[in-house]
Image (cartoon, rainbow, N blue to C red):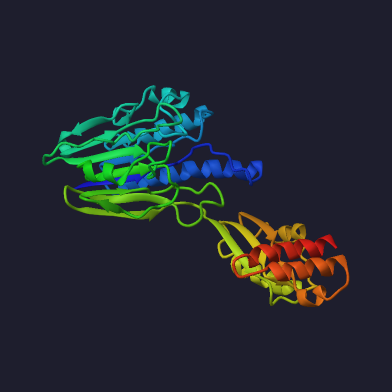
C-alpha cells in the first residue's frame, strides 16, 4: 500500500466574473492558501506521492509571484514525489511551465505529450502520466495501453474526459478496464466523482479544491488515502475556504417584506460563503421586491450575494381571461395552451404579460 494525495483543477489566477475586482483578488489569494493547506495535510499525513491531474493554471497569463509561490511549496516537500499532468487549460508548452521548471525541486515531474512511466523502486510503485501539448487531445491516450503485470503498484495521473465524444482526451470504460492500472487520478471535471471501479482499476475525479463559480456548488477538496495492488482506501477530504450556494426561496406565503427578509436570513447560513438567491412562487400584489435595495441590506452579511426575481404575480389568470381586453385575450390563450409539461414556461409568459400591460 502507498499513501497518495490526488489534486486537480486548481486554476491558479482564474478570473471571477461576478465578483468585484477586490473580491476576485481575495479569491485568487485564497486558492493559494488552500493549496498550501493541502500541502500541510500531505506533510502531516505522511503522503508519499502527490498526483496533480491538470489545469494547475487557468491560462498562460500567470504572474511571477504565483510561479515563485509554487516553487516554494514544492521546496517544502522534497521528500514527497509530485507528478503533474498538464491539461487543456495549461498545456505543458505554456510559459508558466517553462518558468516553473527553472530550479524546480528534483522531486517534481511534469509530464509531456507522450505517455511515460516513472518507477519509484523504494515505494514499489510506477507512476504513468501524460501532458496536453495543446488545448485538444482528440484520441484517448490510454487506448490500447496496458501497465506491466508484476508486483509493483501502477498509478496514472491524467487529464481526461469520461466521454468518447470529447475533444479532451476521451477516456472510455474499456480503456480503464484494460489498463491494468491500480488507480487513475483524473482531472477535468470540477466535482468529486466518488471513487469508482472498472474491473480491477479504481479511478476518480477529486474536483477542484476551491470553487470558481455558481456552477460549482457543494464541498470541494482533494482525495487522500492508501492504494495497493488489490485494495483502495481513498477518501474525499474537503479543504475549500468557501462554498458557492444556489438557492430558490418561495415567497408565495409572504405578505410583507419582513416575511421575505426572514427567509433570506435563514438561507444565508455561513458568513464566509457565496450565494445566488432566486425568488420563486407567486408574489402578492402589495409586495415589492427591489433587488438593489435587498442586495444593499444583505451584502455585508456574507462574502457575496446576488438576487434574482423569478416570481409570478399572485393574480387569478382565469379572472383576467374574462376581460374583453388584449390582456384578457392573451390570458385566455395561455390557459388553452398550458399543460403539466409546459406549465413553468407559460408561468413566465404570464409574468411577462402582466409586466407588459
Could you tell whether 241 is left or right of 109 in the image? right
- Residue at (83% x, 70% y) in the render: 328
In percent of width and height, residue 25 lies at: 59, 41
- Which corner quadrant of the image does residue 275 belong to? bottom right
- Residue at (86% x, 65% y) in the render: 326
Q: Nearer the viewer, residue 193 or 258?
A: 193
In percent of width and height, residue 291 lies at: 74, 59
Could you tell whether 74 is left or right of 337 in the image? left
Q: How many numbered marks are there? A: 0
In percent of width and height, residue 304 lies at: 63, 54
Residue 61 visible in the snapshot:
yes
Tell me: residue 200, above or below residue 265: above
Could you tell whether 23 is left or right of 84 in the image? right
- Which corner quadrant of the image does residue 14 belong to? top right
- Residue at (27% x, 52% y) in the render: 197
Residue 181 visible in the snapshot:
no
Amino acid at each position: 500500500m502507498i499513501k497518495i494525495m490526488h489534486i486537480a483543477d486548481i486554476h491558479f489566477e482564474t478570473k471571477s466574473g461576478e465578483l468585484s475586482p477586490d473580491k476576485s483578488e481575495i479569491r485568487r489569494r485564497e486558492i493559494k492558501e488552500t493549496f498550501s493547506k493541502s500541502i500541510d495535510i500531505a506533510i502531516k499525513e505522511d503522503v508519499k506521492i502527490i498526483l496533480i491531474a491538470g489545469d494547475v493554471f487557468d491560462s498562460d497569463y500567470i504572474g511571477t509571484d504565483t510561479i515563485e509561490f509554487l516553487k516554494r511549496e514544492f521546496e517544502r516537500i522534497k521528500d514527497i514525489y509530485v507528478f503533474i499532468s498538464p491539461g487543456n487549460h495549461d498545456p505543458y508548452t505554456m510559459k508558466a511551465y517553462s518558468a516553473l521548471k527553472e530550479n524546480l525541486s528534483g522531486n517534481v515531474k511534469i509530464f509531456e505529450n507522450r505517455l511515460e512511466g516513472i518507477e519509484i523502486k523504494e515505494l514499489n510503485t510506477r507512476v504513468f502520466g501524460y501532458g496536453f501539448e495543446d488545448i485538444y487531445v482528440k484520441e484517448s491516450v490510454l487506448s490500447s495501453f496496458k501497465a506491466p503485470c508484476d508486483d509493483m503498484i501502477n498509478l496514472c495521473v491524467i487529464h481526461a474526459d469520461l466521454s468518447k465524444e470529447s475533444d479532451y482526451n476521451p477516456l472510455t470504460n474499456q480503456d480503464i478496464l484494460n489498463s491494468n492500472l491500480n488507480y487513475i487520478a483524473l482531472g477535468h471535471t470540477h466535482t468529486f466523482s466518488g471513487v469508482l471501479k472498472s474491473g480491477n482499476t479504481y479511478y476518480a475525479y477529486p474536483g477542484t479544491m476551491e470553487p470558481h463559480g455558481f456552477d460549482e456548488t457543494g464541498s470541494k477538496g482533494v482525495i487522500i488515502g492508501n492504494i495497493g495492488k488489490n485494495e483502495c482506501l481513498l477518501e474525499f477530504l474537503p479543504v475549500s475556504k468557501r462554498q458557492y450556494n444556489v438557492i430558490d426561496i418561495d415567497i408565495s406565503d409572504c405578505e410583507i417584506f419582513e416575511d421575505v427578509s426572514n427567509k433570506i436570513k435563514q438561507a444565508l447560513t455561513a458568513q464566509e460563503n457565496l450565494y445566488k438567491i432566486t425568488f420563486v412562487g407567486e408574489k402578492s400584489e402589495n409586495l415589492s421586491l427591489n433587488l438593489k435595495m435587498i442586495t444593499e441590506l444583505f451584502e455585508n452579511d456574507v462574502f457575496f450575494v446576488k438576487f434574482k426575481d423569478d416570481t409570478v404575480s399572485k393574480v387569478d389568470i382565469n379572472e383576467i381571461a374574462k376581460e374583453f381586453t388584449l390582456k384578457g385575450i392573451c390570458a385566455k390563450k395561455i390557459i388553452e395552451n398550458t399543460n403539466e409539461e409546459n406549465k413553468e414556461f407559460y408561468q413566465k409568459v404570464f409574468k411577462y404579460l402582466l409586466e407588459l400591460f
